[in-house]
Image: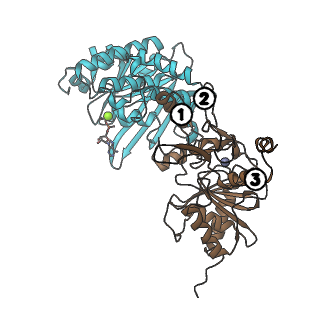
Amino acid sequence: MTDYNFAYLDEQTKRMIRRAILKGLAIPGYQVPFASREMPMPYGWGTGGVQVSAATLTPEDVFKVIDQGADDTTNAVSIRKFFQATAGVDTTEETDKATVIQTRHRIPEAALNEDQILVYQVPIPEPLRFLEPRETETRKMHSLEEYGLMHVKLYEDIARHGAIATAYAYPVKVEGRYVMDPSPIPKFDNPKMTMPAIQLFGAGREQRIYALPPYTEVVSLDFEDYPFEASKADHSCELCGADDSYLDEVIVDDQGGRIFVCSDTAYCTARQAAQQDTPTPQAQEAAV
Amino acid sequence: MTLQNSSDAFRSEYTDHSAPHPLLRVVDIEKCYGQRIGCTGVNFDLYPGEVMGIVGESGSGKSTLLNCLAGHLEPDQGEVLFDTRDAGLVDTVTMAEPERRMLSRTDWAFVHQHARDGLRMSVSAGGNVGERLMAVGARHYGQIRDEAIDWLGRVEINETRIDDRPSAFSGGMQQRLQIARNLVTGPRLVFMDEPTGGLDVSVQARLLDLLRGLVRQMGLSAIIVTHDLAVVRLLADRLMVMKDGHVVETGLTDQVLDDPQHAYTQLLVSSVLQV
Ligand SMILES: Nc1ncnc2c1ncn2[C@@H]1O[C@H](COP(=O)(O)OP(=O)(O)O)[C@@H](O)[C@H]1O
Ligand SMILES: [Mg+2]
Ligand SMILES: [Zn+2]
């Protein structure tokens, strides 16, 4: 028999992961150790997220995968195919149709709801790692809420760059307690993290799971005189005109021409489709 | 009757001290490494504003004792009572670790012999000085920076160096930066282990002058471990002389250095044993 168990992992492993997820939900922002399994894909391909998705998916779920906002990158496609093959679940690119969304580096632009679960792939779960490499020490710092070092990092940013230059993986404080790495999403996405959907974070190589229950308070760290800013490129999307979505800069020719387009491809596509259905005011004027 | 420089005589000397409570009361501290004695039978009180020097040859147990007092080592026996803000004298050996770590970040400071043990080498000078402020909740960048500039000035580091990493500093500057980083939150008790050790003689002299100035201005309470009698002559009100893990003599600094009672202290003072 070559048949896999539903969603690849055996039931015992899934139970173990679910226990870690539940513990993570009970202690928002706390990194729960778990026995990460070998997955049929290399680390860096989101094995932590894949294991969390495997433990979360049910046959009725509709699954979406995004990588840097896009549904069609190699990474996103291969993870989607993996669960199509091993779990037989339906997949979608439309954010509002999905019940489980696995993501790397973005939160979808469309607001999520209470019936959805967002699963993040996390490379480095420990926000204190860069200033304190000793794991025993960082665990102690979390347990004793000794987070001064996080602000030292932000201080260094301002001293060196004149502003908080951290643009991705911008540290947050969860429910006034644990400092958490939101994974390498742009800081533009940080304010969205207080949301109706459940958020689960899986780090495969580092063997950590953490979680945010719906509506958890998530605050980006900052200084009184250098407040957090959810910044994005100061442009509109070239394709759909959105001025409120996170933009990628795309090189369009070999003369150095650049345009800005939505990083969330599903969002952009949906907006373009809607614009074709209902002509824009300019198009209406032109038609007169 | 000759004055006995024993710890008992020493304590009675201080019973009518104006401060009602000692800042630190050390009771019968012992720490062994296997069969080897690190330090044993150490008793003393430190009153607010006092500087206690601990002298002795290399290997006499000075660092072991200091680390027991500062909570870096757990003594096998004895109590280290500190006058906490909330509850008065509390044994820091048996106190819960979170509280002890909190003390280390607030009321206590520790200056290491090797600056790199006490500094974050990958963080700028300003960040090093600001860390303790941020650890106790400072969240205004401009104020943290002003405070860092002020403290760099106090330890004679030009403010133009504020964004440089300590790895770009000389040994003397690193040590001054470590001192600034420790004193910025106004600790009530400062532990120093050979603060001038490993520095050139001329650099040592400058650091010593600086330390003396800070001790006087701030009215610091401190325990300074050194094998260098010049350091305690300049900084310490009182002395403890250690040999083979035991305290062999205690007393006022001038008294001990000018009229040593114990044969070992006499050797030490006559510079026969000086390194
Ligand atoms: N970690 C250790 N393990 C074993 N023996 C130690 C250790 N640290 C110090 N000692 C021993 O304890 C004694 C006191 O050492 P120490 O406190 O470092 O003296 P000092 O600071 O006066 O030079 C010495 O005999 C030393 O060899
Ligand atoms: Mg020593
Ligand atoms: Zn768009």
Residue at x-position 33% and y-position 49%? B35
Label 3 in the same subunit as label 1: yes
Q: How is the image coloured?
A: by chain
- Residue at image mark 3: A276
User: In the drawing, what numbered circle is on residue A154?
Assistant: 1
**Chain in brown (letter):** A
- Amino acid carrying label 2: it is Phe
Q: Residue furthest right?
A: A288
Q: Which quarter of the picture shows residue B1?
A: top left
The quadrant of the picture occupied by the N terminus of chain A is: bottom right
**Under tag 2, what secondary structure?**
loop
Q: Colour of chain B?
A: cyan
Indicate left or right for A63 with B252 as reference: right
- Residue at image mark 2: A223
Residue at x-position 64% and y-position 68%? A54
Indicate left or right for B214 with A252 as reference: left
Q: Estimate the spatial distance between the alpha carbons at disc 1 and disc 2, rounded to whole Å.
A: 8 Å
The answer to whether residue B130 is above or below residue A140 is above
Between marks 2 and 3 in the image, the one whose residue lies nearer the viewer:
3
Pointer 2 chain:
A
Binning the other alpha carbons within 10 Å of mark 2 as few (below 14), some (14 to 19) or many (20 upward) gives some
